[in-house]
């Protein structure tokens, strides 16, 4: 079983300013773990920049021009109170989206069974014409759209277990029956969307959890809501918005998952992928702001991807 | 302890307490907390009529995660007006309330202090846990000195 790891040095140069939780050290912590012996079988790849054709499957041309135009020559520029960019942010954002597209090409080209994209800035809050919540381009949605446009897939699913709702992905998918989006997240925190009643055209499943929920509520949400709908959708490819900020040590939310929960959920997603789409899974980093919890959670997530059951 | 039963809120409260305007900014309230070690400050209008209470708890609540930003922003939150986060229609007590009853109220409500008002909703004092503890001590110390008999009962 081959698992690919996409990451790029530009993603570490994207500087969000002193003390910002979405910092380069996140990626350093992850890559330090993924560089150790137990992960020696990972195949590391440098992603290209996403093309404007790939980006405009999801974003407006004016959004691309505005974001890339706002990248400062030096210092920082605040798109909003949360979303700060610096001179390397443009390239980082293009490599981040490019990583998901390259992973899609590789996995659909049968070069590997699955892939993990260790990238930043994250993407799932970015809407077609709005950067927000640390996100510039919606990496996972761009990858999903690329899979349909370049590989003629009919049905692509995104499973989002970041503690925040992926408003951007939902907005991009909610009118298109070729996409499925399911999110499990904490209710009433940023960005405020993701209520149970938000169902798109029947292709969106939102499982909001109340503060202090943990394993039991995750299991229930997956088993009762997300897994049945995902199986019914019969995805040809599954992408994961893999945020690890629902961990019990994360400073930005109040959900209490552990590394074991991430391993379990990853196995569950892989099991559906094995049944529906020959195990094709591409996981894309979103949030996770406690460096040691992030590193250990990503480690177990990637280890589980590497141990994915063989498919025919 | 018998003497304590004779006390009223007016005997133990802090008279003419520092209060804050509903139009003050949260950082001004935070300064008061910092300087005076208050836990809460009454919010009054120009006529010193009680409008609300602003406590450290209310300030903490202003920093809870919400749907507007991923990370709460200190300066923006501290620029908000007191009236946006204060507790409106606070429980207030009369200066004539027996102190023993006030004590029960503080325990039941788990609150740290209560404003004291007169007719017309005028703020005349504030009474805290510490004030009640002091009154308890004062009442028993005096009795033990004056009437040693009390010890046997
Ligand atoms: Zn998040």
Image (spheres, coloured by chain):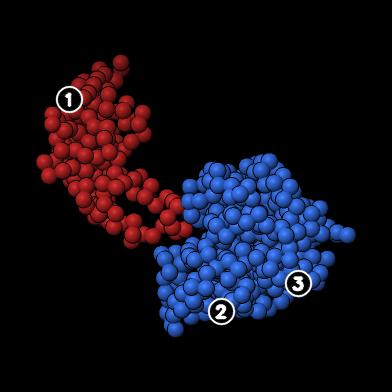
Chain colours: A blue, B red
Q: Residues within 10 Å of mark 3 (few under 14, many from 20)?
A: some
| Alpha carbon distance from label 2 to label 3 | 22 Å
| Alpha carbon distance from label 3 to label 1 | 80 Å
Q: Secondary structure at mark 1?
A: loop
Q: Would you name the residue on which mark 3 appears?
A: A106
Q: Which mark is residue A253?
A: none
Residue A287 visible, this orientation: no
Q: Residues within 10 Å of mark 1 (few under 14, many from 20)?
A: few
Question: Which quarter shows the N terminus of chain A?
Answer: bottom right
Q: Secondary structure at mark 3?
A: helix
Residue A306 visible, this orientation: yes
Chain of residue at mark 2: A
Which image quadrant for residue A11? Answer: bottom right
Have a look at marks 3 and 1 and say if they share a chain: no
Q: Residues within 10 Å of mark 2 (few under 14, many from 20)?
A: many
Q: Residue at x 42, y 55 (%)?
A: B68
Q: Would you name the residue on which mark 1 appears?
A: B96
Percent position (x, y) of residue B24?
22, 52
């Amino acid at each position: 079983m081959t698992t690919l790891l996409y990451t790029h040095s530009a993603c570490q140069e994207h500087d969000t300013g002193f003390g910002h939780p979405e910092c380069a050290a996140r990626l350093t912590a992850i890559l330090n773990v993924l560089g150790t012996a137990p992960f020696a079988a990972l195949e590391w790849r440098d992603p290209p920049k996403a093309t404007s054709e790939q980006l405009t499957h999801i974003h407006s041309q004016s959004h691309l021009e505005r974001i890339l135009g706002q990248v400062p020559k030096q210092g920082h520029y605040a798109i909003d109170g949360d979303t700060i960019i610096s001179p390397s942010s443009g390239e980082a954002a293009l490599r981040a989206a490019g990583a998901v597209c390259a992973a899609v090409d590789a996995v659909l080209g049968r070069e590997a069974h699955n892939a993990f994209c260790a990238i930043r800035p994250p993407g799932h809050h970015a809407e077609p014409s709005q950067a927000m919540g640390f996100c510039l381009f919606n990496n996972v949605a761009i990858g999903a759209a690329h899979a349909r446009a370049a590989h003629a897939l009919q049905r692509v699913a995104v499973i989002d277990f970041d503690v925040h709702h992926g408003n951007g992905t939902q907005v991009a998918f909610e009118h298109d029956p070729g996409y499925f989006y399911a999110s499990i997240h904490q209710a009433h925190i940023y960005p405020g969307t993701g209520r149970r009643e938000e169902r798109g055209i029947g292709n969106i499943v939102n499982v909001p959890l109340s503060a202090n929920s943990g394993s039991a509520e995750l299991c229930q949400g997956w088993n009762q809501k997300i897994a049945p709908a995902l199986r019914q959708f019969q995805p040809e490819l599954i992408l994961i918005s893999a945020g690890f900020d629902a961990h019990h040590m994360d400073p930005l939310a109040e959900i209490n998952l552990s590394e074991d929960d991430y391993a379990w959920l990853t196995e569950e997603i892989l099991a559906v992928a094995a049944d529906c789409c020959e195990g094709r899974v591409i996981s894309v980093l979103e949030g996770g702001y406690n460096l040691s919890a992030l590193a250990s959670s990503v480690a177990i997530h990637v280890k589980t991807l590497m141990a994915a059951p063989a498919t025919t | 302890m018998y003497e304590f039963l004779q006390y009223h809120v007016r005997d133990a409260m802090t008279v003419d307490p520092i209060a804050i305007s509903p139009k003050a900014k949260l950082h001004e309230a935070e300064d008061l907390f910092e300087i005076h070690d208050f836990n809460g400050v009454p919010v009054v209008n120009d006529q010193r009529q009680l409008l609300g209470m602003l406590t450290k708890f209310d300030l903490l609540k202003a920093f809870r995660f919400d749907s507007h930003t991923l990370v709460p922003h200190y300066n923006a939150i501290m620029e908000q007006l007191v009236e946006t986060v204060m507790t409106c229609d606070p429980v207030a007590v009369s200066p004539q309330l027996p102190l023993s009853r006030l004590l029960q109220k503080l325990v039941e409500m788990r609150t740290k202090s209560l404003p004291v008002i007169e007719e017309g909703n005028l703020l005349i004092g504030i009474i805290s846990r510490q004030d009640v503890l002091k009154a308890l001590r004062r009442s028993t110390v005096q009795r033990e000195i004056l009437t040693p008999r009390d010890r046997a009962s």
